[in-house]
Image: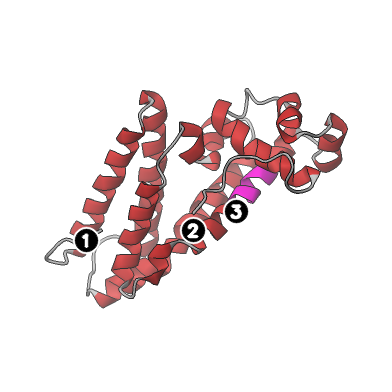
Amino acid sequence: MPRPTKHSPERGDARTRLLEAARDVIREQGFAATSVDALCTRAGVTKGAFFHHFESKEALGVAAADYWSETTAAFFASAPYHAHEDPLRRVLGYIDFRREIIAGELAEFTCLVGTMSQEVYDSHPAIRAACAESILGHAAALEPDIEAAMQRHDVTGDWSVASLARHTQAVLQGAFILAKATGDPAVAIESVDHLRRYIELLFATGKPVRH
């Protein structure tokens, strides 16, 4: 299954090409270091086309976060872990799937909205809000399976379904930061493995739920 990455200048209209260019370039070098000129060059469009679709670089950042949400939602919706009958298997399957797609160059598997959040949380509140909506929206998509797993396996605790869903994203975003800091994807994989063990312990199934 291809990940939502790798821009193709020949595909889509100018707006789509600019959004795909933003997705890739910002993950490679950050939002602040990404110029309008660089985006236009990567997208194969003119600067006039850029400002026809986006009134500013900040507007592009907000739209890029929304586009990331749309494309990654479709990507995960078609992932194979949804086929498991046991909801706990689906939750753990999600973690396994996240582990599998940590591959290639750092910019290919790290998160656009996580990258932008770290840079612009104070300087560009509109982008920060779009990034928060994206990350928390993805977390919310896990909640039905977590809740169903708690019911099926008779699990209770002093934590909520929503808090565990958010925690998965906190671990993943932290894993991406460590991978960037070290230049080593294996560090991210290590964190994801610990996340899987943690969820197994929370659900206390008595034996590991295998990959």
Label 3: how many residues lie within 10 Å, few (<14), some (14-19) or many (20+)? some
User: Mark 1: which amino acid?
Assistant: Arg
Label 2: how many residues lie within 10 Å, few (<14), some (14-19) or many (20+)? some
Evaluate whether residue 208 shows in this view. yes
User: Residue 39 falls in which quadrant of the image?
Assistant: top right
- Contact (Cβ within 8 Å) of mark 1 with mark 2: no
Instruction: Using the image, tell me which numbered label, if any, was put on residue 71.
Output: 3
- Contact (Cβ within 8 Å) of mark 2 with mark 3: no
Q: Which residues are magenta?
A: 62-68
In the rendered image, residue 183, in percent from the top left (x then y), is placed at 39, 25
Q: Is residue 149 left or right of residue 50?
A: left
Q: Is residue 92 left or right of residue 119?
A: left
Residue under numbered circle 1? 210
In the rendered image, residue 112, in percent from the top left (x then y), is placed at 55, 40
Q: Residue at x 60, y 32 (%)?
A: 26
Farthest residue toward the top? 33
Farthest residue toward the front? 10
Image quarter in which the C terminus is found: bottom left
Residue under numbered circle 2? 76
| Dot placed on the residue nearer the N-terminal end, 1 or 2 | 2
In the rendered image, residue 199, in percent from the top left (x then y), is placed at 25, 57
Q: Residue at x 63, y 25 (%)?
A: 32
Query: In front here: 14 or 34?
Result: 14
| Dot placed on the residue nearer the N-terminal end, 2 or 3 | 3
Secondary structure under the numbered disc 1 in the rendered image: loop
User: Mark 2: which amino acid?
Assistant: Phe
